[in-house]
Image: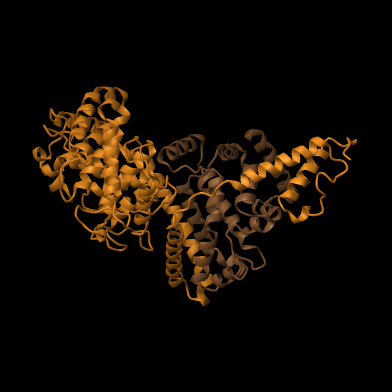
Amino acid sequence: MASTDERLDPAGEAPSDPTDEALMLEARGGSAPAFETIVRRRHRDLMNYFVRMGVSTHEAEDMTQDTFVRLFRYRDRYAPRAQLRTFLFVMARQVWIDRWRRRANRERREEAARSDAEAGDSFSTATDAAAARAEEALRRLPEPMREVVSLCFYGGLRYGEIAEVLGVAEGTVKSRMFHALRKLREEMR
Amino acid sequence: MKRRSTRHPGDGETRLADLTARFLGEPSAAAVPTAAGHVIDTAELCAEAAALERTAETLRRLAPPTVACELPDRILAAVARERALERTRSRIRFPRPVRPLSRAAAVFLAVALGGVIAWMAAVERRQPMNDAGALPAALDDAFAWLRAAQESDGSWRPERWGGSAEYTVGLTASSLLALLSETNERARVHDKPTIERAARFLVASQAPAGRLGPACAGDLYNHAMATLALLEARTQAPDSVPPETIEQAIDFIVRRQLPSGGWGYAGGDDTGANTGISVWQLMALHRARSQGRLNDARSLLRGRFWLSSMTDGRGHFGYRKPADSVGQDATLTAMGAYCMALISDGLERQPTQPAEAAASDAPDFYHWFFAAAAWTAGAESDPRFPAALARNLLALREPEGELKGSWRPVGRWSQAGGRLYSTSMAILSLAQATGSPAPRGG
């Protein structure tokens, strides 16, 4: 079982480093280095989230960029008591909705998947057959379940934070996670 | 220890959801006892909980995606642009004491102005763009002229029509693209031999290095246009374009990309990357990608990054650096806006001013083509643009005589491209602005 700390801090922030929240407060005050630290610390989490949400790596890069630009644009709205990670993923999800889901008709997705696969830009990171099956199963998961799984496993968010990002009750997150894992297990058999 | 209990049917799922939360380290589930220690758990329940935990472990072990090392710098550059934009906005704020009043006035003015513009646009839309069928007839005549002007070897020769022989490959490509924009099915069948001959000429122009066309300073113009035309021709005459020709042509573009991500004239250094040449290469790469023929999308991504670095705070594009308009601000901005919209699938919209330029500027087929392309690709522009463009173009066509159907070679670049240039660009502009699925690199 992975430790709780590992899930909470996928970026590997050392204990002595300033927290994201402290950095964000500095960034709100105009500190460019503080914002840069946040970018360098958290961009991989966002990439991982977008990729697991079914976006190609090159588009995930664009979306990661958009998310940080929005974070910068709306930095004054950040409430110091909130986890920055939650705030960041609320924006990431909005970027995803804006730039992908609304325009992603079936045809476009198929085209993107085909061209990505042919262009070697596929988002597959599988190193063995089990991982490949897991990725494929994740890709086929219904969107609400995939969101919960992606935010939890690849965004490092807790149920309460996921509930906040998605605007649903924590019990809904718990239920979706359970059904998602069950469905994934069936698909991966 | 384990026994079947008289449980509600939903209990098992609730229990499993609790156990899932527990092995995921949820603090709210810390008090939930383990499966083995729970008196109502059945053997099946325990087994399922263990299986779910293994599934979770597999998901956790999935390797993260590869992240380009330049991504943080790219993000920070975008943030820096946003910061610069904020500074610009803050400079034009109203002084605080009058701000509420001024804001109210601004809102009123914006609403009033918006209403007037919407009304004007509606009036403009009601005006037929192709009075008395002038536009379809003009296009029919233009296609006929192009067909007749083709040489027996499949090329179009610029020197016969007031242009320079140096651009034979580029202008054969633009003429081919113009013919390929014809949507009429009968005409497409009729044009197939013309298309095949032109494609074969372009294929035969390929040098061993992969370059299409002769070695010259502006070889990438010829090359990208020819690559684009061959990619497009493959959709209608696949047998006349060998896949390896396309592959080598794409490789050539990738190899010629400068470290900065842009492209420039042959022999130039990294500072020579310019928007004019780069946009054509990006169009070709994008078209290749959409056909699944780009082996490595990084070149496209780097090019896009370079192009986005050419914008100033107002969304205008420079030639070699932001605000470096070299007297062609409208054309460069249309090119950049089009290309950014194209390679971001319409998601990055830059404002352009094509309607004003089409209505008031001196004739410029090159600008009109990119303004039309930007319009089609979804860049922000004036809704009156297609009508203005059609009016201006129809005024420049040859209505009678042996040149009937072609466009007069006037304006910038017509000395180099001649009548083939003006005619092919006019056709492509009209085809795009009036909704024909013209080849436009995407």
Which corner quadrant holds the C terminus of chain A? Answer: top right
Horizontal side of residue A103 vs B140, given as left or right = right
- The x and y percentages for residue B388 are 30, 46
Chain whose colour in the figure is orange: B
Eyeballing the image, is A151 above or below B400? Answer: below
Quadrant in the rendering for residue B8: top right
Q: Horizontal and vertical percent for residue B351?
A: 38, 54
A89 or A20: which is nearer to us? A20
Q: Quadrant of residue B308?
A: bottom left
Which chain is brown in the picture?
Answer: A
Q: Position of residue A21 (x, y in %)?
A: 61, 67
Q: Is residue A138 left or right of residue A168?
A: left
Q: How is the image coloured?
A: by chain
Residue placed farthest to the bottom in the image?
Answer: B97
From the viewer's side, name the closer residue of B146 and B167: B167
Q: Check the image and report above or below for B391 versus B357.
A: above
Q: Would residue B32 appear left or right of B241 to someone viewing this image?
A: right
Q: Is residue B359 visible?
A: no
Q: How many marks?
A: 0
B379 sits left or right of A104 in the view = left
Depth check: give the residue in front, A33 or B49. Answer: B49
- Tell me: residue A40, above or below residue B286: below
Task: Tell me what residue is drawn at x 85 percent, y 45 percent.
Answer: B38
Q: Residue at coordinates 30% horizontally, 27% vertically from top-left?
A: B238
Give the image location of residue B185, x and y in percent: 32, 24
**Looking at this view, is A73 or B238 the one in front?**
B238
Q: Look at the image and tell me whether residue B299 can be seen.
A: yes
